[in-house]
Amino acid sequence: MVEKKQTPMMAQYLAIKETCQDAILFYRMGDFYEMFLEDAVKAAGILEIALTSRNKNDPDPVPMCGVPYKAADLYIAKLIEKGCKVAVCEQVEDPAQAKGLVKREIIRVITPGMILNDSLLDRETNNFLVAISKTPEHAGLACIDISTGSFTTCQVKRTSGTIPYALLDEALKLSPKEVLLPESFKSDPAMAAIRKTFSHVEITYLDNYTFRPDNARQLLTEQFATRSLEGFGIERMQACICAAGAAISYVRDTQLSDTSHIYKVIPYNLNDFMVIDDRSCKNLELLTNIQTQSPKGSLIQILDKTVTAMGGRLIKQWVRYPLVDKDLIQQRLHAIEELIDAPSTHQTLGYLLKSVYDLERLGSRISMGQGNARDMLSLKNSLSVLPVLFKEVEIFESPILNGDGLNGAGTDEKQALVEGLEELAQLIGKAIREDAVHVLNEGNLINDGYSPELDELLSITRDGKSWIAKTEKKEKESTGLSSLKIKYNKVFGYFIEVSKAQSAQVPDHYIRKQTLVNAERFITQEMKAVEDTIFNAQERRNALEYEIFCTVREKVAQRTKDILTMAQFIAAMDVVQGLARAAVENAYVKPDINDDRHIDIQDGRHPVVEKLIQGERYVPNSIFLDDTQCQQILITGPNMAGKSTVLRQVALTVLMAQMGSFVPAVSASICITDRIFTRVGALDNLSSGQSTFMVEMEETANIVNNATEKSLVILDEIGRGTSTYDGMSIAWAVAEYLHDLNGKGVKTLFATHYHELLQLEEIKPRIKNYNIAVKEFNDNIVFLRSLVKGGTNRSYGIQVARLAGVPDDIIDLAKSVLASAEHHPMTPAPLPVPVKKKKGSKKQSNSGQMNLFGPSDDDLRQMLHNVDIAQMTPLDALNFLNELKLKVEA
Ligand SMILES: Nc1ncnc2c1ncn2[C@@H]1O[C@H](COP(=O)(O)OP(=O)(O)OP(=O)(O)O)[C@@H](O)[C@H]1O
């Protein structure tokens, strides 16, 4: 086949495209980015723009589409959202100076995990890229956000051939936008689990070499300009090094610019924080509401009263990473307390922080040479607030508020940091015009008086006419020629015109250009020079302004580390001031952190439900859990009574206390919890191909396998999705197992409709029965919402069904089914496990749970056997009950 001859431009395009096969190439042509061939077809479809062709008359036209360069961000965002990568290719030489085809190069590759542009980022969400590595001993994870410079890493010991669940869960917790894996993982047994975990995340495979320890180590030491990784504490953490090195390699390959804002990597240990796995995070609605998937109706919505973007991102981390170090928790609580005690300073602080822009992202963009003049002004305005802000916080003792220890041990260092950043603000203020535009090559960036050279150009472009008038006056005076005038035409540009009569008297340095009937026209060397200046002034001014801008930006970039240090301090201060506001507005109290291993919450409330309920007052409830008397609480009560709410309320209160927040209660004493496990609600996971019951059992397995005596377990109705006896048996066994765990037991709150489980109180010393009280009258019930001692064997299912609007006919029928069932002699149901009765304990009861299994009635048995309760609506269930009744009566 004869290869088709390409135009030089197309040849250049194809050569560049060859280097970025997996990305859509944005090829700059004048004011547009053009896309060709398959890229054009794909992008036109996603962007909904016209697909044309470059050479329409050719029998084999090249598909193309394009977007204006000024609006490129919008289009790039859309492509990234659809999981595409975009390689931006710019003209890297001045087309006017280019000999032949203008040179072009890829200047940046934008991928879901490599985004720097503000318009493509969510203000209050980190844009994390996670790299996962595996060494014979460990699995490692590195997490980087190039938009803020944050870079962390951790590793987990491997106990089997695959990647440990804890590491995958950690990766999931970070909600990465992109995951980097070595090519070799494609055939790894862990891949199925990884694909499942990251089903909605872009996975990018890198050469195995990138993850090799020696290569990774070298990349990292180069990045941080250090001889070893000792200073970061990861010298001997090989899995961390491999993952971190691969992440840095990817950043460099895609960003192709200065990445020195990533100047450190912070290792962490999963045990340094309370573990809340992804499911529990969802179950407890920490960041999003389970129904709507939006932050509305979640804990973060209630707690997040931050006013800066940095604070908005940090509070999410505080919620996801509650502390287990008592001192660190106390520090946060103390800071909140100080703010609450100084309401007027607290208010001023909130007001001042509102003027602080996103220092992390501004600092990172500027450092990477991508900040524009507006970014510089935002930085200046933010930094200018610092001196006042630091004056205000002098009254506080807490380092989170007063910045002690910032930038080093002493007060001098802190002072030096603040002053240095103030000087930076002054430099920007002096250099950059307040009305500077976004575009960097069209001038109007630099202030008058900053550069004498620029001032000259500015005065020429602005005052061209007055310069001419001045020169005319000057020449008239020096020559004494009254007819002398300066004029302009397209042929000569500016020239001096003198009447014929006086033309003989012109000075020698005048150069004759044209003779007219009545006048002579001249130019001078000086004049031509000035003329050049005027003509070229605009262009030169634009170029010089850009040059000066880059110099100032470079000076600012040299202080990136200081800017980012300050950003982190401001973020924490903002989170704390936000938590203090939430505490005041919602009447929260400071929790006590005890060492006695008990949880004592008096008049606690659910922080979200108390805000959402309408037409009802939230009824507070008290809970006491310890390791000797009351370690497991079994909560019974009708549907809708408030069992799930009280369970979650306790979990959230413990979590809030450990993140360092005040809590919704009248008083609360909390011991440090290492993990909160939840098994709540029947979250349908059909989309991931799992049945409700399967999910429930997986969650249960995770709890019993991983809970320790320092954990808190929340179990909401285990075993609902299977037959009554299977479910009850599992629930019973799990409750016993948790009570006996490691001979010490684990603090557990267990809501259940299986009244048989109430008997556990009699055989297990640390299990206590509670119920949520209701009041009955005239066959109706009123929910009292208060948690009281003792169990209840009444379900009030029919009354709740009525409240829910189930038609009266069905309610009446259900009642008669129930009555008839209650009056039929039933064969007692066997207990799920043998129960040793304690001396003096009450008679075992099978109350409430009816046995409908007539041993001789095979039909009924078969019907019950065939029914799948998990798939039934309440209405189906009632209809089924009716069917049973008709069968019995037949
Ligand atoms: N302490 C309370 N004060 C006021 N209202 C409450 C309280 N607790 C719960 N509620 C209200 O009752 C509703 C039902 O509560 P919840 O879901 O906890 O009941 P439940 O007993 O777990 O029900 P089910 O057994 O059907 O799952 C809540 O959505 C809330 O509106």
Image: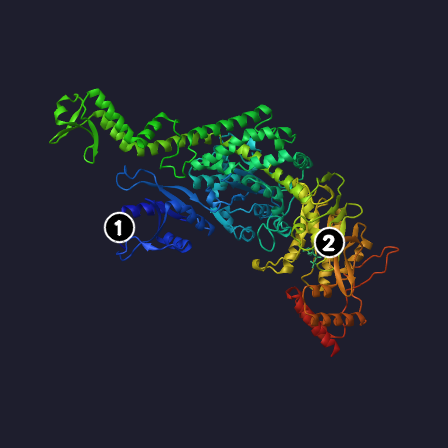
Which quarter of the image is occupied by the N terminus? bottom left
Give the quarter of the figure containing the C terminus: bottom right
- What is the spatial separation of the Cα atoms under label 2 and label 1, in whole angstroms? 75 Å
114 vs 299, nearest the viewer: 299
How would you rate the neighbour count of disc 2 (Cα within 10 Å): few for under 14, some for 14-19, many for 20 or more? many
Horizontally, is 247 left or right of 878 in the view? left
Q: Is residue 66 above or below residue 812?
A: above
Q: Quadrant of residue 478?
A: top left
Q: Amino acid at mark 2?
A: Phe
Write down which quadrant ligand 1 falls in: bottom right
In the displayed structure, 481 sits above or below 148; it is: above
Mark 1, ligand 1, within 8 Å: the answer is: no
- Rate crowding at label 1 as few (under 14), some (14 to 19) or many (20 or more) other CA atoms within 10 Å: few
Image position, residue 109 (x, y; %): 42, 44
Instruction: Specify which label sits upstream in the sequence, 2 or 1.
Output: 1
Give the left or right position of residue 155, taking residue 869 as reference: left
- Left or right, 742 with respect to 203, comes to right
Q: Who is closer to the viewer here, 148 or 198?
A: 148
Residue under label 2, please give it.
Answer: 750
Q: How is the image coloured?
A: rainbow
